[in-house]
Amino acid sequence: MAKKLTEFERGVLYAAVHLQRGPNESGLAADLLREAGFSDLDCSELDEYDKEALRIINEEIDMALQGLD
């Protein structure tokens, strides 16, 4: 079973989602996740809207975010 996200982790992921949805900001979103040490978090508890944005970051920037299937 995946570890439940902390409120801080969830907040950083939401910030990355909002950055990614901006014009050409996948790189900035990935930088945020890397700097926070969250490039491999399990995101399975997020909703589909957020997962969709994080999938793009995973694919475009070659991140290791989990639980996005």
Image (cartoon, grey):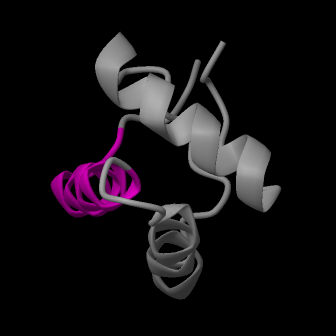
Nearest the viewer among 51 and 56 is 56
Give percent across and percent down for residue 17: 33, 48
Residue occupying the far front of the picture: 23
Residue at the spot x=24%, y=52% of the render?
A: 18
Residue at 54% x, 80% y is 31
- The residue most toward the right is 62
Quarter of image, res 4? top left
Could you tell whether 15 is left or right of 35 in the image?
Answer: left
Dividing the picture into quarters, in which one does residue 32 lie? bottom left
Quarter of the image with the N terminus is top right
Residue 14 among magenta residues: yes
Dominant SS in magenta: helix
* Magenta run includes residue 13: yes
Figure check: 12 above or below 31? above
Residues drawn in magenta: 5-20
3 over 65 or under it: above or below: above
Residue 37 shows up from this direction: yes
- Which quadrant of the rendered structure holds the C terminus? top right
User: For the point 67% across and 35% down, which residue is it?
Assistant: 66
Location of residue 15 by image quarter: bottom left
Q: Residue at x 34, y 43 (%)?
A: 5
Q: How many marks?
A: 0
Whether residue 64 can be seen here: no
Residue 67 at what x, y percent from top left? 61, 24
Q: Position of residue 35 (x, y in %)?
A: 52, 87
Give the percent coordinates (x, y) of residue 11.
19, 57
